[in-house]
Image: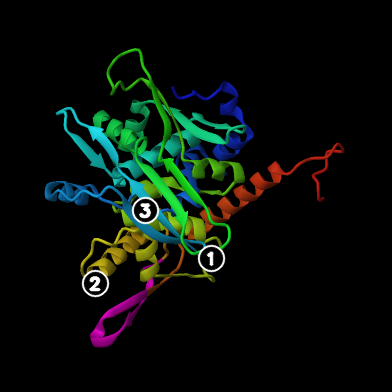
Amino acid sequence: MPTPPQPEDFGSRQIDLFRDLLCNTEAERDSLSNVFDLWDSIPRYVVSRQQQEKWRKAGTFPALHEVPFHYRGRELTATIQPAAMKGRDGIVRSYFPSANEELIEDVLRKIATDQNNGYYDPKDRRSGVVFTLHMVRKELERRGHGRTYGEITLSLEIMSSAVIRTTTTDGKTGEFTSNSLYLNNLFRVSKGKLAEDPEAKWFADFHPFASRALDELTYRQFNYARLMGHKSQLARWLNKVLSLKYLNASFLHPFEIRFSTITRDSGLLNGYAVVRLAVAAVDSAFAELHNCRPPLLGCPPEKKVVQGARGKIVDVVYTLHPSREFVVEVKAASKRRSLAEDSRQPVDNSGARQGE
């Protein structure tokens, strides 16, 4: 049986820092959450439910799905093993975590951040969240992504059964392999027998990479409300990438990103048979970042198409200019990170921080 978090885990220094968002008002705090450096750089929700249904009908559902990507100059591969779930009709079906599960994970992270239900065990380096289905459903509805209790429960079960293996593939030093569930130790405490009891208390441990981020402060504050307002999964991916990488956002420092990089690291464009259609999907995602409120981009991106023989698209270079709102958000996130790091420095007996 999974071990529930202990009372002291809800007040550990790491979870306090995770919840300590830098903002001026409660309304502003309501719009904020955290994005994880390594964990949110892994393309782990790339197989759509539509694609999975096609595989089922064709009898070609794969046992594993591999997604190569780059992380800070390193070549890695994410290998995903689907969850096998027995439906109410008695039929066992496999599910890869998809955009549905990604939204649920973002909501769980927000609940851990905003409603004092997050925990961190310093001894075992274990982090997670206590929640109810009602809390998850209410937050999803509030952000425009309504789900039934049954759909939420299915997503939780998929994330607690699907395995993701992350390995380095570039042959450089510092090689590693990580093998874990998306959510560990998912457990429901309910007096009733209904699996969809909306008031039952659940707890779940986050992925070890997320717990590592809490321990090492490798997460950043970002505009969660904007993220949840995006219609496309690709726009949400770009939002997180820019929140993690565009740290010098200003009117004097544009951000350059290539179509080939987006294709390689998002894993969300592999289903397009025609390159021009994939480029159109990227253009649409950037339009969301410009037209959302508050906007992330101050204007549509500058676009340079690199063509090969016979006008074939070889690549596209996008130059991005931040909105005023995004510049303010990035500065606040950097200040909050700096304050958190300062608070973690050891103090000597005189009360002065070491190194001062």
Residue 24 visible in the snapshot: no
Q: Residue at x 60, y 37 (%)?
A: 14
State yes or no: discs 2 and 3 in contact (Cβ < 8 Å): no
Magenta stretch?
299-316
Pick the front one: 72 or 226: 72
Q: Residue at x 32, y 78 (%)?
A: 314
The kind of residue on which mark 3 rests is: Arg
Pick the front one: 166 or 97: 166
User: How many numbered markers are drawn?
Assistant: 3
Report the residue that reaches farthest toward the top. 191
Q: Which is nearer the N-term, disc 3 or disc 1?
A: 3
Tell me the crowding category of disc 3: few under 14, some 14 to 19, or many 20 or more residues within 10 angstroms, Cα based.
Answer: many
Give the CA separation, mark 2 to mark 1: 31 Å
Tell me the crowding category of disc 2: few under 14, some 14 to 19, or many 20 or more residues within 10 angstroms, Cα based.
Answer: few
Q: Which is nearer the N-term, disc 2 or disc 3?
A: 3
Q: Badge 3 is on which residue?
A: 236
The x, y position of residue 95, in whole percent, is 26, 42
Pick the front one: 61 or 117: 61
Q: Badge 2 is on which residue?
A: 276
Q: Please identify the quarter of the rendering in which residue 77 is found.
A: bottom left
Residue 250: mark: 1
Mark 2, secondary structure of its residue: helix
Mark 3, secondary structure of its residue: helix
Give the CA separation, mark 2 to mark 3: 21 Å
The x, y position of residue 148, in whole percent, is 24, 31
Whether residue 304 appears in magenta in the rendering, the answer is yes
Callout in the foreground (3, 1):
3
Tell me the crowding category of disc 1: few under 14, some 14 to 19, or many 20 or more residues within 10 angstroms, Cα based.
Answer: some
The x, y position of residue 279, in whole percent, is 28, 69
Q: Residue at x 27, y 87 (%)?
A: 309
